[in-house]
Amino acid sequence: MAQQFKILIAGNNDPISSKGIDLLKAEPSFSVEVNMDLKAEDAMIEASRDAHAIIVRSGAKVTAKVLDAAPLLKVVGRAGVGVDNIDVPVASKRGVVVMNTPGGNTISTAEQAFTLMMALSRKTPQAHATIVSGKWDRKSFQGTEVYGKTLVVLGMGRIGAEFAKRAKAFGMRVVAYDPYLSKNRAESLGVELCEDLDAAIVQADYITMHMPLTPETKHMINAKRLASLKKSCRIINCARGGLIDDAALAEALNNGTIAGAALDVFEVEPPPADYPLLKAPNTVFTPHLGASTEEAQENVGIEIAEVIKAHLLQGTVVNAVNMPNVDPKTLADLGPFLKFGELLGRLLSQFAPQRSNVVRINYSGKVGTGDTTLISRSVLKGFLERAVGAEQVNYINANGVAENLGLRTTESRVPDASEFTDLIEVQASNGTETASIAGTFFAGEPRIVKVNGRHIETRPEGTLLLIENQDRPGMIAAYSTILGKHKINIADMSLSRNKEGGTALTLLTLDSTPSQSVLGELEAIEGISRLHSVVV
């Protein structure tokens, strides 16, 4: 008799599409339970105890306690992109695969953002409100055309590219800012690529945001940047709350600094009644409806049902955010290299040249004797997380995400060991500048042994401070004094130089992360040519 699997479709009044549910119920090996009243963690724990698979949208949380209480659980599926309602690290430790549907809501979100832009331009919601209240006031609702206007797209992933395509059809001039978009890709999309965020937004009649929320992009539109915009500029955000400083935006709208804003996402969701933005003029708001179309919900519902079914019946892994598509024995052999490769890629992304369009992965020693495809994908996954958001890239789609950004990858393998038994080196280049990092294993523990081609040795942990400076007396004392003044302890130090009196490279391991002001002080030291703070 075939094994029976229980699938829990859990939520808080937000089920997946009926077609996805029907697809699962049609499989004789599946027992499908749909429970849309699982807001409380205790209720979720109880419902999950005998589940082999859990499917959620955003309303139900799969916490560490839920995972620990479900010994039979094999897979958690998220019908959508974000997996912040799933404890992915604990799932990984438990051997539970976490899958999502990163492409299912692309068109839906692009159309929602475009709709908000048009509604904002023509004051459609406000005009509607007057009509239904019995008024006929044409003079108060004179709008503006988008034709001939300059649109700045912040983030040219799938959704940003779809928005740009529609804007060009409406006769808009499209300028793109995306640190990870290559010039060739920009040309193929028919958009103007701007190298600098501030230089891009000051041109804008409209700004639409399609960036992931990361420490680097949080409040990327802040009070200072709002003050630099045209008074006629209008901002649309259907990406993530927190990309805009909502308090600063409210002040800018109230002061007439900009012409308007249309938001589908907020820093606080749902926004409370006293939220400053809600009383600001010239606004259009919707309650996080980017993916809320019949088509998008049907697409993600069917897609997540199909990948869950394939995983339970055939062991197939598709769109996993925490596991490659590989059999258990190979995974056991490659596991340390996959984790280390992802770490190297993530570290390199923090000091790689802007607009890198090539990533080269070089293997030497025993690691180069086998199939390195999965390791290369892990490197690429780590490198791309800052560009598109960790939930948007995985071992399966990393190559496609890189291709969409115009990022080319190459791989070389040298089976013969050189100075190290095993060595993985990752390089990123934009055609004029190159950065690199290399690592190996000592007694089973990962070590960074080269940075930018220079020999150095440290454990990949904590915060790493990379400093390049003139090789002369007093340099170490100069930056050590500043770190000490700010109570930042140096846990480890590794030094290298190309020649006496030439260029020195220092890699510091710090117990805490220096602020931007501290980094500014360090950069001001005479003789320092390059400085990067890298978080492991």
Image (tube, helix red, strand yellow):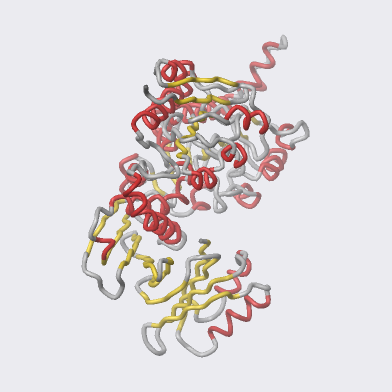
Residue 510's quadrant in the figure?
A: bottom right
Position in image of residue 453 (x %, y %): 34, 73
Comparing 334 with 99, the one in front is 334
Taking the image as shown, residue 497 lies to the left or right of residue 222, namely: left
Task: Identify which residue is drawn at 34% across, 62% down.
Answer: 427
Q: Residue at x 47, y 30 (%)?
A: 110
- Residue 339 appears in view: yes
Q: Quadrant of residue 361?
A: bottom left
Q: Establish if 407 lies above or below 116.
A: below
Q: Determine which quarter of the picture holds residue 59.
A: top right
Q: Is residue 263 visible?
A: no
Residue 496 x, y percent position in the rendering = 42, 81
Q: Quadrant of the N terminus?
A: top left
Residue 454: where, in percent of width, then height? 37, 76
* Nearer to us in this view, 112 or 80: 80
Q: Nearer the viewer, residue 43 or 486?
A: 43
Outermost residue to the right: 274
Q: Residue at x 46, y 29 (%)?
A: 105
Horizontally, is 322 left or right of 118 in the view?
A: left
Q: Residue furthest top?
A: 134
Q: How many marks?
A: 0
Residue 111, given in percent of the width and then of the height, sits at: 47, 27
